[in-house]
Image (cartoon, rainbow, N blue to C red):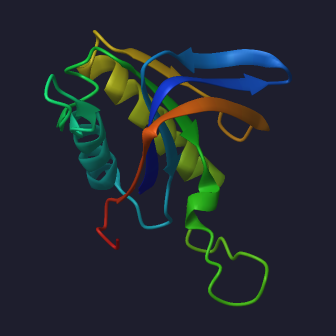
Amino acid sequence: MRAVVQRVTNAKVEVAKKVVGEIDRGILVFVGVGKDDTRKDLLWMTKKIPNLRIFEDENGKMNRSVVDVNGGILVVSQFTLYGDCRRGKRPSFSDAASPEIAKKLYEEFCDILSKNYPNLKISRGIFQADMKVILTNDGPVTLLLDSQKLF
């Protein structure tokens, strides 16, 4: 499972010009599911992401998590995180999970966050929809995560 995590002052997702998910201060998480991902990968991500210390403390050090600052998490599915551009000019998505598997893990990812972090606003996009993501990156702070620790 792969994720791009961005610290934001605000973010929203629109589908057909309608806002389907939004947060104020928090993190925007783009999630991609790989063909070999299991529940173990999912659980690793749902523990890792909310506890990343990427928000500043009173001394200006990145020492607080989204949980610590009572922020929000906006989760957007993005299979293109498994795009392999090493050969040719067209990305290969052969390492991405099938839509059926990816949807199941994506929805479970969001459900686990909602269950385990009831004090946070957990919002999401719509799986396989043509989404417009509007955000204000704070910092900018952008991190790449891979549950298999490939990078």
Foreground residue among 23 and 94: 23
Q: Is residue 150 above or below residue 120?
A: below
Residue displayed at 40% across by 36% down: 109
- Report how many numbered discs are placed on residues in the image: 0
Residue displayed at 67% across by 30% down: 134
Foreground residue among 10 and 101: 10
**Where in the figure is residue 100, as x and y percent of width and height?**
61, 48
The quarter of the picture where residue 89 lies is bottom right
Foreground residue among 62 and 83: 62
**Where in the figure is residue 82, as x and y percent of width and height?**
56, 66
Q: Residue furthest top?
A: 119
151 with respect to 102 (left or right): left
Q: Is residue 46 above or below residue 2?
A: above
The quarter of the picture where residue 148 lies is bottom left
The quarter of the picture where residue 139 lies is top left
31 with respect to 20 (left or right): left
Q: Residue furthest bottom?
A: 87
Residue displayed at 75% across by 89% down: 88
**Where in the figure is residue 147, as x and y percent of width and height?**
31, 60
**Where in the figure is residue 1, as x and y percent of width and height?**
41, 57
Residue displayed at 50% across by 47% down: 31
Q: Quadrant of the C terminus?
A: bottom left
